[in-house]
Each structure stands twice: as C-alpha cells, then as structure tokens.
Image: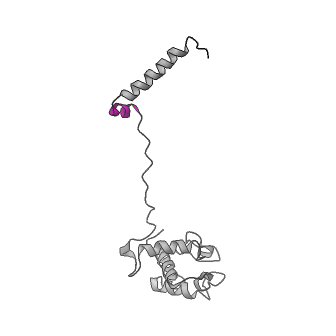
Amino acid sequence: MRRTAWTTPLAVLALAGLASVACQPQDAQQQQQPPAEQPPAAQPPAAQQPTAAELPPGVTPEMVAQGQQIFTSTGLCFTCHGPDGKGMPNLGPNLTDQQWLNIDGSYDAIVEVVQTGVAQPKEAASPMPPMGGAQLTEEQVRAVAAYVYSLSHGGA
C-alpha cells in the first residue's frame, strides 16, 4: 500500500483532535455541546376523568379506566355512542353532556340502564339491547357505568 504525502499529516491532525476532546474536563465538554433538546413534559389530558372525590361511593379511578377500555372495545358501546362517548346520529346519545334522556344520570341508574338496555329510546332510531349486545360480567357492567358516569360528571 502506498502512502501519499498528505495522508500522514491528516491522520496526525485527526488523532490530535480526538485527543484534545478526550482530555478536556467533563464540564468543558458539556459546555461546548449544545444542550440536548428536552421533550416537552407530558401534560395530563385536560380533565378526562373526575377525581376520586367526585366519583360516587364505591367507584374508583381504576374502575373508570377499566370501563373506558371495555367501552371502546369488547363492550361495543362505542359503536352507537362513538369512541369518545359523544354519540352517533340516530344511534346513541351523547354521554359527555349533562343531558340524560332515559335516566337521571346517577351511577346506579347508569348501572341499571347498561344491564337492561333501553327498549324504547326517546331519540335514537333503534333500542339499546342489554349490555349493548355484549356479554359483560357484573364487574364489567359496573366499570362501564363508572366510565360513563365520569364522562358527564367532570370527565372528557
């Protein structure tokens, strides 16, 4: 292999540059480097769920989270009430507002309506079957009711 006249000086300069960086105190290295861009702090979603003090007795934030998961998947609630609970035209009413069409909006009433359905809805074109047509356990019904309660009582 043949060396050219400029290869050796270039290699020496490169090594000298690496050595000078390696020999600097750590503080000096940090001062020379631009600060790493920090990702924005994760902001909690704006009042998606009420605090535990706003939940009915016996309802926990964990139940609300479980209910949201069921509402948006196996519970099938989202098919008529929308993935965000804001309703679908002619299918299911908005669950995020303070207006209740078939019940008073209390947690116990929501549990009951999820269990039994709405045979003759006041505004929707078709009835709501018990548990929205899904197969839910008592615990899952109560969790879905907790989530629905949270939607209209300080939630999303």
* Residue in the foreground of this view, choosing between 85 and 101: 85
* Residue drawn at x 60%, y 81% as measured from the top left: 132
Residue 19 left/right relative to 79: left
Q: In the drawing, does residue 104 fall left or right of residue 1? A: left
Residue 64, percent across and down?
A: 46, 74
Q: Quadrant of the N terminus?
A: top right
Q: Which of the 4 image quarters holds residue 102? A: bottom right
Image position, residue 17 (x, y; %): 44, 23
Q: Is residue 147 visible?
A: yes
User: Relative to residue 46, is residue 116 depicted above or below?
Assistant: below
- The residue lying furthest to the front in this view is 1
Q: Which residues are magenta?
A: 25-37
Q: Quadrant of residue 43?
A: bottom left
Residue most extreme to the top: 5
Does residue 48 lie above or below 108 as drawn? above
Residue at 50% from the left image edge and 84% from the top image edge: 111
In magenta stretch: residue 113: no
Residue pictured at 66% horizontal, 83% vertical: 126
The residue at the point 50 percent across, 14 percent down is 9
Q: How is the image coloured?
A: one colour
Q: Is residue 33 above or below residue 58?
A: above
- What x and y, as percent, mark residue 35? 41, 38
Q: Position of residue 134 (x, y in %)?
A: 61, 81
Specify whether residue 31 is painted magenta. Answer: yes
Is residue 153 in view? Answer: no
